[in-house]
Amino acid sequence: MSQLRSGDSALMQELGDFPEDDLNVEQVEKACRTIRHSVPEDGVELDPHVRDCVKSYTQPWLVVSRRCQGDGCSAYSERTGLHEVLQKQTFESDIQPDKEQTPVKSPSLAGLSDDSGRSLTSSDFDLRCLTPDRRVEGLLAFSSHDELDRFNQEARHGNRHPELFALYPQPDEEDAVEIRPIPDCPKEHSGDRILIRCQAIKFEIDIEPIFASMALYDLKEKKKISENFYCDLNSEQFRYLLKPHCPCVDYSSLARSAIFSVTYPSPDIYLVIKLEKVLQQGEISDCADPYITMRESDSTKNKDKLEKLRCQAEAFCQRLGRYRMPFAWATVNIMEVINTATTNDRDVTDSDSLKSGKSSSIDRRAQLPRRNSERYNTLDDQYCNISAFKPATITITTIFKQEGDRLSDEDLLKFLADIKKTSTPQRRIKTISGSIKLDMSPLHDFPHACLSTELIPLIPVAEKSIRHVKEVLEFPSREVYVPHNIYRNLLYVYPQRLNFVNRLTSARNISIKMQFMSGEDPSCALPVIFGKSSGPEFVQEVYTPVTYHNKSPDFYEEVKFALPARLTGRHHLLFTFYHISCQQKQNQSGSCETLIGYSWLPMVNNDRLQTGQFCLPIALDRLPVNYSLHPPEKLPPQLPPVKWMESHKGLFNLEVQAVSSVHTQDNHLERFFTLCHALEGGATFPLRVREEKIPENKLEHELKLSIISLSSSSLEPLVLFLHLVLDKLFTLIMQPMVIAGQTANLSQIAFESVVSIVNSLHNSQELTRDQQGRNSLLATYLYWVFRLPDPPRDLQNAGSGSVPAAESRYSTMGRATAATVGNMLLQSRIRSSSNPDIPGPHTSAEDAEVRNILSAKGHNIPGSRMSTYVEVTNHHNPTGSTRPSSRKQFHEELALQMVVSTGVCRENAYKYAWFFFELLVKSMAQHVSQLDKNIVPRRSRFSNRFKDDITTIVSVVTAEIGTILVKQQKEVEQAEKVNISLAFFLYDLLSLMDRGFVFQLVKNYCNQISAKSVSLPTLISMRLEFLRILCSHEHYLNLSLFFSSPASAPVSPCPSISSQGSGSCIFQEQQRILGLFELSQEFKQQHYLTGLLLTELSAALDMESEGGKVQRKAINAIYSLLCSHDLDNRCVKPEVRGKVAALYLPLVGIIIDSTNYLDFTVSDARSGKNKTGGPEDDLENVPPINQSVAMAIAGNPFNTLGRNVLVSMASMQGKSVATLAADTSRHLLVCFLWVMKNGDRSLIQRWTVDMSPSQLNKLLELLTICVSCFEYRGKPSSDKVSTQALQKSHHAKLQLEEALLRGMGARGEMMKRVGGMDRTIGQRENLRWRKDLTQWRQTNDKQDKTKAELDQEALISGNLATETNLIILDLLETIVQAVPLADCKDSVVGGVLKVLLHSLTCSQSSTFLSHTFSTLRALVVKFGDLLFEEEAEQCADLCQKVLQYCSSPVDENRSQACATLYLIMRYSYSNASNFSRVKMQVTMSLASLVGKSSDFQDEYLRRSLRTILAYAEEDTEMQNTQLPSQVNELLKNLNSILSDTVKMREFQEDPEMLMDLMYRIAKGYQTSPDLRLTWLQNMAEKHNNKKCYTESAMCLVHAAALVAEYLSMLEDHKYLPVGSVTFQNISPNVLEESAVSDDILSPDEDGVCSGRYFTESGLVGLLEQAAELFSNGGLYEAVNEVYKIIIPILEAHRDFRKLASTHDKLQRAFDNIIQKGHKRMFGTYFRVGFYGAKFGDLDEREYIYKEPGITHLPEISHRLENFYSQCLGDALVLIKDSIPVDKEQLNPDKAYIQITYVEPFFDDYEMKDRLTNFEKSFNLRRFMYTTPFTKSGRPRGELNEQYKRKTILTTMHAFPYVKTRLNVINKEEFDLTPIEVAIEDMQKKTRELAVATHREQPDAKMLQMLLQGSVGATVNQGPLEVAQVFLNEIPADPKLFRHHNKLRLCFKEFIMRCGEAVEKNKHLITLDQKEYQQELKKNYNRLRESLRPMLERKIPELYKPIIRPRLENRDSFKRLSFRRTQEENS
């Protein structure tokens, strides 16, 4: 097998064995916004710099790509259409019940009485009147098991989705290091664009043309931020007036719309519109006057005036049409408009827009996306979001008149500041009435017919001629860091002011004519000035507007020039100053211009464009000869002398600004470019650079200095010309420079400069970086711009004549010289001090390390490194020829420079290694693309020396990473970035170099990194990111030799893919198969990269790390890798997929071993660590409590899915287990499922057969986890659930689970067997893969998603759930079909069944269910006997699950479930002959099902029962047996249970009624213990949901007593409770559970008492749950009683661990009693009486209701009123008092409720036993309430007529019971006479005082309050009054003697207690209460004195010696009842 099998090599070809044309180096044409590139005018000889610029801006991009790169990754983008091909899966959870919830009707109140004669379980309903569902075809048709399996398999495999990962949420981008973002293509910078269209400019009168110009100003930056846009809206007739002055009108000049751009929005951006008109005679105010005073509406009045004005205007237009004058201006704050338009959609008038800039509308802005800087996120910027406002129409009605003396921009900005403050400018400027109407909208796509700022048409071009839209150039308010990308060469000139004050002539109306001259002849004026509106595009001259009669005018004019590409010394700006005469004098004819003087400005000075502020003198009369060669200030003396105004003083101020992508306007850059071009030849020496002259021999030195100082230039110009600068430097690295006959080598210094620039760009705060820390500008340059410098040319230099070709070879500097230059570079950096962070030169350990590496290769001798060109050493023989040599390659030179660099340069080169790596790769790629592939084999593409250099570089970088990690922990992030860039470098090299060589590098890296003493997590994390990037290579599968068959392949890393036979010994086949699923040494050698990755994964999982970060990284790496295979178009064929899956078989082993890390094992239930569900679970689809808990409460006898993964694992694991986050676990599991889906089926089957049982169990465990993990979460509802409700329900769940699941041990064991999806598989809601922790939150922020998106998401997740579960099902089938081969049948089948049943517990789609039911039926047919005999509990579960689906609203699910259930019955009848057991289990399942589920659909279940009946009737084979009749009987029984349920449904809303009904149903099952138990548990769960923990506990105690009864019948153990008698200490009510006599029921009858609870551990489990619940309810004393029963059982079982935990719990209970003793509130009781026929059975019933601890009367009244008024509407009346109700007086049409607060009542003898608070609140049967009355009928009266009635009620059972309301069965009442009432009151007062006085920590306030009420002077009906009423005289009636005496004694004690209290108070008071104390004392003394005579008077009769009284009379005294004595005497 040493050769590849033929099929494999074919596969290998298929996946593209590294196609030769893998590399793609292509030129990409630049996208151009305009219809042609902006280039200089033709026919001009350009100087080299301009030529380079133009070439750089127009040449195509050079992009290197690889053909298949990103094949896997791109597939995710194809998911967008996924939902269209998927079929919709039906989930029960998504189906909305059709029926509306019917409100509870009043009849529901009738018909519930305990003595209603009918039996509850009689069937109300005949099944046969229903029609059965569709039957499943061919249910019994299969001849053989194999045929059945084959049929099922084909069904399962039809219509499956091939790509699992397409359904899975996209991988987390955060970890996706392998995604190298492609930098955006460089393009011209533009800010947010706004389109402004000028609609109308209207004034009250319309008499002349008006011209407008607009521009943006930023008030905050005090700067004009756009050029001017000119437009006019003049009518044709006005235009006609101007015709003589501009005969030619270009179409583009008629534009009325402009596109403005804003890069840095601020709240103070104003659009300023300036209006001008034709010059006319008069001041501005005179000319504006008619506009201010006249109204169009008064036209009749002003008709003549208007006519006159029009005629004047016409005259001025004809004569002065070419001159303008300022007229008016207006402004609007566009940011306010934008914000207003964003917040409300309406027209904005200027009342809004002129408000102060602080208007509230601004505050609503979202933060602006950061432009280029962090520094600039100042507060103001946050408001403005320009790109997304609604289009708005602005009407500006405030138009200000221009002030002739305040025209400058400074004045304008002051006005704007005033407007911002007060909304009007100061100095009340006059306003002109009129309006300007503008439309403003954001611009995303350019409209047709746009023109660029150079007037070149933009794409798209308009077909027909429509009005143009002009782009307005922005002058950004701050620097913009975007390199130039188009040729732009514009000049803006701003004349500012002129000073002619001292000139005496008539120069008053001054205009300046401006021209751009190329010589001195008037004909040299160039047409390069951009025209204004309604005129030519370009003009030769332009005039400034005139301010009338102003000798020192200000100007606001902006003149825009297109600069010629080549500027010479002759080019200059010429200014001619004129006086314009407005009135034509009689003797004057023709011209109205009078020349005043001239000035000029040369365009270049020392070859540099002149810009900035200038103040020029003015020459009178004429221009001197050759004036243009000199600036006017420095003009040499002339003959005849020049006549200057004011003796050569500067009088004319102007500013010149250039916007140019040719002129750098930076000294350093200019110098560098100039010197570089000098080298390229054609320069004359000495060379002039600015002021200095450079001779040829100094050129090299100067050039070096200029290179060094490059990085000192300021950031903005460096960035703007970055592409050009780098191109030049790379050319210098490559080209030998021949200077003055010497070959100069600038490689090293150029390289150092590149490093320095790279460093300063990275360190700049203003520039952005991508997530891998790469500077965006550099990344863009590398990807799009960089191309290999042209190969070195033989250069001639004017100074040196020609040099022989041989001379052009040159050497590379060795280390020594490099060091000195490096030092020099460093010095210059320190000098320039622009980067203070760079440390001085230093040698560190890592330098030493690298030096060792280098010296090992013999590279360390200074000067020993030579590049490919060898310098000729024999200087004396310059013409001697040396051997020819190959050309020097850029990549070699670059690698060499990296290796020999030193000091700071070296440090930075490696710090930003990514740049040089990508540079190397791109240059290598270009080199490779130029080679002839056929001749040059892959391994000879690069020289050995280059490979050595690469090895060195990789080794140095790896060492760097290590050093950072060891030394500078803070720099870990830096190390990560370098690590990633190194990985990408090797990743790229795999496509360029020999793969064996690259693998060797990878190996070196791994060894080198592993040798570092760094913390393991960091190390693994580094290696993981590194490998993740390598593995994302498009040919990774081939690199990993995926096609080689498992036993053979060359060992990798290997130089090439030759197949070397690995002489593997033949293991036993079985070991071999098992070995495939483990990460073996052989595997790692054979599949090198995969082996490395899996090793890291394994290591990561075995390690504990902070927050599982490393684990997440490792899992995500594997996950994204598989994802890319799955979605890779090359892996579509199943056989390819099979091979790929085989590559990952060891992953399966790793995952199985890591089962105990997955999130679904709860690390420790007690710590409650994983209990973080979030409010993300919708209320609708969350089960009320998690399944396992529900089972624990409901004691459902079936769910045996418990499998305590953790316990079993923890015993094997020695270390603590860090669990993974849920989303990470999902990723890992989805990988496992993918391998299982695509792996070879026969191989997997062999593997499962050969597995050890423990491994197989682990596998099944894993599958169970998978099922839970990929459960469908339900469609997210689009309405939001209130978060409070969510948190509440969530909190309740957590508390309950905490309570139920805290314990381990026997009860834990039981829980383990009981729990539905037991604890170990994680609380169900935590399984909701902790969406709060995942990135891709399935329901994240529901409110942000449209319904369509939500549906789409649900569709995909539904398909994912179905697909994952089907994969699991396939695997289970594979395992089961292998059973005959395996030894331990039963455990395998049992295990598989567990997983299947578990999958039925989860929400599943119909597709999956139909296949699962098929599988279940196959299992019943194949292994029925085994199931029914061995796996009784599983069988019970099976019945319950199937029955549950019989009530499904989905027809398909129902029909499958019916078929399955019938098959189970048939099989258990015919084969296993234990139908009775199935019968019992089905009955109990139903009981438990209907009890627990609140939304149970009985009609569906009935239909299912009918369907099963149909099966039985149609089953021909079985017709002659008992089966049909047995089935019939069973179904009847089930039907009757259903009828009970329907009743329960009616009372769904009335909890008390519902519990009564459930109680009665349970009572009805007295003869069927299993069912009674089930119903008791159902009640327990209902109580628990309502937080009635005590009642819930009582239900479980009753259940336990029931179990105890039956256990004592079966076995007679001393330690077991003797039936229910033992339980009476907990509650006497329990005795009702004592067993029905033996003749009715015997426990050993088949199927009876067979549930798992009828065992000792079941009993203990029930009691422990009860104890937990008692503890929750605060009844800690009851906890003790419960444990008294448990402890003997535990002792008998010698279960000491359990005993320990039990005593621990007892201790906690007693601690709680001590701590909370008197603070506990046990319950409040109310008597509720129902009166009225409308209540049906409830009429005249009285109940005692038990309510939670502190419930006030209004609360319960409100609750009952709410509930019953829903049923009865307005008929309900609440009786507000507690007087006995007289039935006769009630309205028969009404229903009455009387609610009274009652207190527990105890006889005196009882009080001796009931000492504690608990005892007084537990086991209560008697309650009392009092009703005050008087004989006259009023409730209250004077003291001597106030009676009181006490009513004592007795209930049927004692509270607490299994219900919260109990019937009143007995009622006694007796009355108290007024004196008895007084005695009670005084006793109460005395008691209170005594308690308050003798408290351990007395409460002064409380004491004073009581004292105030006792001794206070003015207390109404106070003690004194009571004494005066009853004690003043001895009563006449002897019967009252005793009462009189008792009251007297009460007062005696009372006054004593008062005295004590007053004394006590004396010690408690503060100083300021002294007076108060004296007052109290005084009052006390007064009271004592007043009472003394009454207290000392005794009744003599009472103190006579008396005869023994008759015994029967004592009772009456004891009961204080006066009644009976009266009766007797009467």
Image (cartoon, helix red, strand yellow):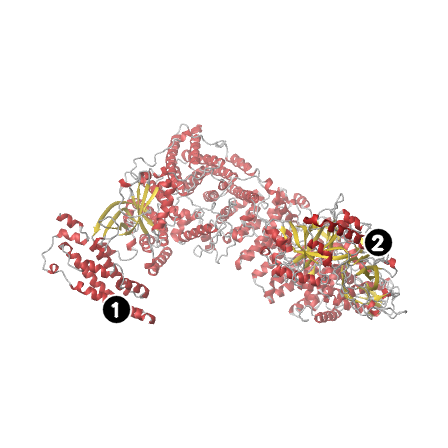
Left or right placement of residue 189 versus residue 1310 in this view: right
Distance between mark 1 and mark 2 Cα atoms = 120 Å
Q: x and y percent of residue 551 in the render?
A: 77, 65
Residue placed under numbered mark 1 in the picture = 1978
**Viewer-nearest residue: 1550 or 1170:** 1550
Q: Residues within 10 Å of mark 1 (few under 14, many from 20)?
A: some
- From the viewer's perspective, is residue 102 above or below residue 715? above
Mark 1 or mark 2: name the one nearer the start of the chain: 2
Figure quadrant of residue 1684: bottom left
- From the viewer's perspective, is residue 1947 above or below residue 1291? below
Q: x and y percent of residue 1975 in the render?
A: 28, 68
Q: x and y percent of residue 1090 in the render?
A: 61, 52
- From the viewer's perspective, is residue 1747 above or below residue 1104? above
The answer to the question of whether label 1 and label 2 lie on touching residues, with beta carbons closer than 8 A, is no
Answer whether residue 1084 is visible to the viewer in this image: no
Residue placed under numbered mark 2 in the picture = 42
Q: x and y percent of residue 1155 in the render?
A: 51, 51
Disc 2 on helix, strand or loop?
loop
Figure quadrant of residue 1892: bottom left
Answer whether residue 2001 is visible to the viewer in this image: yes
Left or right placement of residue 1595 versus residue 1090 in this view: left
Q: Which mark is residue 788?
A: none
Q: Residues within 10 Å of mark 2 (few under 14, many from 20)?
A: few
Q: Amino acid at mark 1?
A: Lys
